[in-house]
Image (cartoon, rainbow, N blue to C red):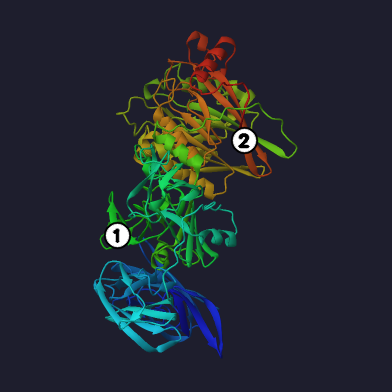
């Protein structure tokens, strides 16, 4: 076996005569006897199957593993602990004793945190499977060089700008041996430097003070104390100086996500015009070609590419995404502040903010797509939105800590913005990523691009990128203007989202189908403890009129749709034990009251509300079990429901505003789970707002915009107990409050005015294209005119209808019609 490489990206080759046959990519050098295996110490036996290690495992060292079995089979070893899996390796185990060596490292040659691990061994044989596991201990790794990455594939003898970024495990001497690429038996020179952090190791193309001849060279880097682990870097040396590309009009600098590999790579390899100031400094972009002009925003130096639209005199009119909020601007920058740079030709990255995915390219081919997390704008922190643009990576930066989380493997690409591993909390020597891993696939960082720590099916993870991406790697970040504006409008009154007014309802075409969804408000299918024996209570009405009674006045709607979805705002429990008497109001119904839902033609309920917990954990469990026993689907509080009909998937989830205040990612996380299940439409419920306030508040709008930005198509609001308005942003419809649908919790209601909405979801083929919305005023009680709550909602008519309609219109930003259409 031989290894050829560039900058640490190694390809294993097998020689057959004079031919070289590529047999696949190998990520690291520590492959001994053909297989990388797990960290192990100790031994274990299952019948005639034994795995044994003789000592503590040391990284970047030879660690002997012994496997004994009386059968030949396929062996899989998996190393894990409470915080994750670090290696899964499969190889053939021969009958008898197999001994092999392992370098004591994790995926992609990453050092393992010191401590205890479990090694699980599975042997699959013709006679069946055998399993065993052992506890192993990993100690402190030996000194070694983690990577050596070149700044360019060409070194010019009269331009002193070529270097390698290199990083050892710890401070120590690093050696660089110089060879002609076609003669690795003759060492031309040896240089040595001592350092610990990531350092630029320069070479000016001289050997013993004299210029080398033009040609290809190999620089072999290694830690002086551990020369077994080398990093080979190839470079072409040329006479003269590095060509200078003049600043000129660039044409388009941004690709699209759906470009084929060849077109994307061509865009990546185009030179970039950047601002020639320090990487973390800011260049103002002016509204006119003068430093006396108004600053439209700022750009970072060295790495942020700009589109040069025209050049006039000493000024360039450019387009780019500014640093302050990630918005696109066009304006003027002095020509003397600009220069042209050429990206590295080995790797390239493309981030799509809309889908939260990153494509990784190697020499023209997309080798994998990772799920990532970019910046999420926060209150007074619009700067946290990850700006789009055409960047090149620059230097690596040290690990850092922020808000209790540790971040590693960071590469600067835009001022203070970095590509880095998602954050972990230190648990002694181990790393707990459980807080931030669920946020992958949605916006959640403070502006940086967070990358998974776990390898994907191709073997790529953040550590792989950190040890392979050369200085000057192209990074495209594609904009998501509608989503970005929604996120900003959610947290800042300085940004307004575009509200989409409804249109007339178009006729249903031959290739379109509909599903009819009826949405209702708060339903308290219970009462207070001291009213259970009251003749005017809900239990008394149910005993007298039966379970079909409460929703019998709504059957003209509920019985003629595909699904009715309401907010079940009470506990269902046989007794009053566990009542949370510290709460002002507590409502309880019996588990058997679920029959009223079915007889009322209600097919699903939301449970994410403030009364679900009126009887503590026991009440919550009893309520969910009652719904499960009745076959009644529910969603909310982390529970999702996917309704499938006519080949379409409609996903439901929901949360309370108190949950959102404690965890701003709960909405996006819920919706992301539904997206991963392939939902065509997502309905998200929010229990929010101020009770009896007829206008929605800022927090309701914030949560609604967050939900829409995350992918919700319908946002259903409840809790204020009065009607509020509706709106449409980002192709979605938001209902802020429906009011009380049916309220068994009190005899004397403050208001009987409420509404329901029938939403006709329209599909063209499988694709959701929009919805018709019919807002329908109702009264919570059929005896509302008498001021009596009879626990039976009815459709409003006449003056009641007009009054309720006007209340909804008061909080709606467009003129409502009885039938409205909102295109996706």
Quarter of the view holding residue 410: bottom left
The crowd level at tag 2 (other Cα within 10 Å; few <14, some 14-19, many 20+) is many
> Residue 522 appears at what percent x and percent y?
48, 26
Residue found at the very far front of the displayed protein: 313
- In percent of width and height, residue 64 lies at 35, 82
State which quadrant residue 489 falls in.
top left
Q: Does residue 138 sit above or below 20 in this rendering?
A: above
Task: Say few, some or many: other residues with alpha carbon within 10 Å of mark 1 (under 14 / 14 to 19 / 20 or more).
Answer: few
Vertical side of 785 occupied by 306: above or below: below
Label 1: state its secondary structure: loop
- Left or right: 433 in relation to 250: left
Q: Secondary structure under badge 2?
A: strand
| Quadrant showing the C terminus | top right
Q: Distance between the Cα atoms at labels 1 and 2?
A: 47 Å
Q: Residue 770 carries which label?
A: 2
Disc on res. 471:
none
Residue 513 image position (x, y, % from top left): 69, 37
Q: Which residue lies furthest to the top in this view?
A: 786
**Closest to the observer: 346 or 210?**
210
Q: For the point 46% across and 58% down, which residue is it? A: 246
Whether the residues at callouts 1 and 2 have beta carbons within 8 Å, the answer is no
Where's residue 457, x and y in %? 50, 65
Q: In this rendering, is residue 683 above or below 144? A: above
Q: Residue furthest right?
A: 510
- Which of 235 and 370 lies nearest the eye of the viewer? 235
Residue at the (29%, 60%) spot, across then down: 398
Task: From the viewer's side, name the closer residue of 222 and 108.
Answer: 222
Q: Residue under circle 1? A: 399
Q: Which badge, 1 or 2, is on the more N-terminal residue? A: 1
Image label count:
2
Can residue 140 be seen at all in this image of the molecule? Answer: yes
Is residue 62 in sight in this rendering?
no
């Amino acid at each position: 076996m031989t290894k050829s490489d560039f900058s640490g990206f190694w390809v294993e080759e097998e020689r057959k005569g004079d031919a070289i046959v590529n047999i696949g990519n190998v990520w690291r050098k520590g492959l001994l006897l053909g297989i990388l295996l797990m960290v192990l110490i100790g031994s274990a036996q299952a019948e005639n199957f034994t795995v044994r290690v003789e000592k503590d495992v040391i990284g970047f060292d030879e660690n002997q593993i012994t496997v004994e079995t009386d059968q030949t089979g396929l062996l899989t070893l998996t190393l894990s602990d409470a915080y994750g899996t670090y290696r899964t390796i499969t190889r053939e185990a021969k009958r008898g004793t197999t001994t092999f060596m392992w370098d004591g490292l994790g995926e992609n040659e990453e050092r393992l945190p010191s401590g205890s691990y479990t090694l699980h061994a599975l042997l699959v044989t013709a006679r069946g499977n055998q399993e065993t596991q052992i506890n192993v201990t990993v100690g402190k790794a030996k000194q070694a060089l983690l990577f050596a990455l070149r700044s360019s594939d060409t070194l010019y003898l009269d331009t002193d700008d070529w270097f390698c970024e290199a990083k050892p495990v710890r401070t120590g001497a690093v050696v660089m041996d110089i060879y002609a690429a076609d003669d690795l038996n003759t060492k031309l020179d040896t240089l040595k430097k001592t350092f610990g952090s990531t350092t630029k190791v320069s070479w000016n193309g001289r050997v013993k003070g004299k210029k080398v001849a033009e040609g290809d060279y190999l620089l072999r880097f290694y830690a002086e104390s551990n020369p077994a682990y080398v990093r080979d870097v190839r470079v072409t040396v040329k006479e003269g100086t590095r060509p200078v590309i003049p600043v000129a009009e660039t044409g388009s600098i941004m690709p699209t996500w759906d470009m084929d590999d060849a077109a994307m790579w061509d865009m990546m390899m185009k030179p970039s015009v950047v601002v020639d100031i320090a990487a973390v400094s800011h260049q103002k972009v002016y509204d006119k070609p003068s430093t006396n002009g108004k600053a439209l925003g700022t750009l970072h130096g060295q790495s942020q590419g700009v589109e040069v639209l025209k050049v006039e005199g000493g000024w360039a009119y450019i387009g780019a995404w500014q640093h302050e909020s990630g918005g696109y601007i066009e304006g003027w920058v002095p020509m003397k502040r600009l220069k042209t740079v050429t990206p590295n030709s080995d790797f390239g990255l493309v981030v799509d903010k809309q889908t939260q995915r990153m494509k990784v390219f190697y020499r023209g081919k997309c080798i994998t797509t990772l799920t990532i997390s970019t910046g999420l704008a926060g209150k007074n922190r619009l700067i946290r939105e990850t700006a789009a643009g055409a960047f090149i990576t620059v230097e690596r930066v040290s690990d850092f800590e922020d808000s209790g989380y540790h971040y590693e493997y960071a590469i600067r690409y835009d001022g203070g913005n970095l590509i880095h591993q998602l954050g972990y909390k230190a648990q002694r020597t181990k790393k707990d990523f459980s807080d931030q891993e669920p946020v992958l696939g949605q916006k959640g960082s403070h502006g940086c691009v967070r990358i998974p720590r776990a390898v994907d099916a191709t073997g790529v993870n953040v550590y792989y990128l950190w040890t392979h991406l050369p200085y000057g790697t192209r990074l495209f970040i594609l904009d998501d203007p509608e989503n970005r504006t929604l996120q900003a409008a959610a947290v800042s009154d300085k940004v307004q989202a575009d509200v989409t007014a409804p249109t007339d309802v178009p006729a249903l075409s031959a290739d379109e189908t509909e599903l009819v969804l009826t949405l209702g408000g708060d339903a308290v299918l219970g009462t207070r403890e001291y009213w259970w024996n009251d003749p005017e209570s809900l239990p008394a009405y149910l005993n007298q009129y039966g379970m079909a009674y409460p929703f019998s006045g709504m059957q003209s709607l509920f019985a003629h749709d595909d699904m009715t979805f309401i907010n079940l705002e009470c506990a269902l429990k046989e007794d009053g034990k566990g009542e949370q008497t510290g709460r002002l109001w507590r409502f309880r119904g019996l588990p058997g009251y679920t029959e009223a839902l079915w007889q009322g033609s209600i097919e699903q309920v939301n449970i994410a509300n403030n009364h679900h917990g009126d009887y503590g954990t026991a009440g919550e469990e009893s309520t969910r079990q009652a719904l499960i026993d009745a076959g009644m689907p529910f969603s909310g509080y982390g529970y999702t429901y996917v309704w499938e009909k006519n080949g379409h998937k409609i996903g439901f989830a929901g949360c309370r505003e108190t949950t959102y205040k404690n965890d701003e990612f709960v909405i996006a996380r819920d919706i992301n789970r539904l997206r991963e299940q392939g939902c065509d439409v997502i309905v998200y419920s929010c229990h929010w707002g101020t009770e009896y306030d007829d206008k929605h508040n800022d927090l309701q709008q914030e949560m609604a915009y967050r939900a829409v930005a995350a992918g919700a198509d319908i946002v259903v609001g409840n809790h204020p107990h009065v009607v509020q308005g509706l709106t449409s942003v980002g192709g979605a419809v938001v209902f802020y409050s429906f009011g009380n649908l049916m309220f068994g919790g009190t005899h004397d209601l403050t208001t009987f005015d409420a509404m329901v909405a029938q939403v006709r979801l329209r599909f063209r083929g499988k694709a959701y294209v929009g919805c018709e919305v019919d807002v329908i005023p109702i009264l919570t009680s059929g005896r509302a005119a008498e001021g009596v709550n009879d626990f039976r909602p009815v459709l409003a008519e006449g003056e009641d209808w007009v009054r309720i309609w006007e209340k909804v219109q008061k909080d709606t930003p467009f003129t409502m019609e009885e039938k409205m259409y909102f295109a996706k």
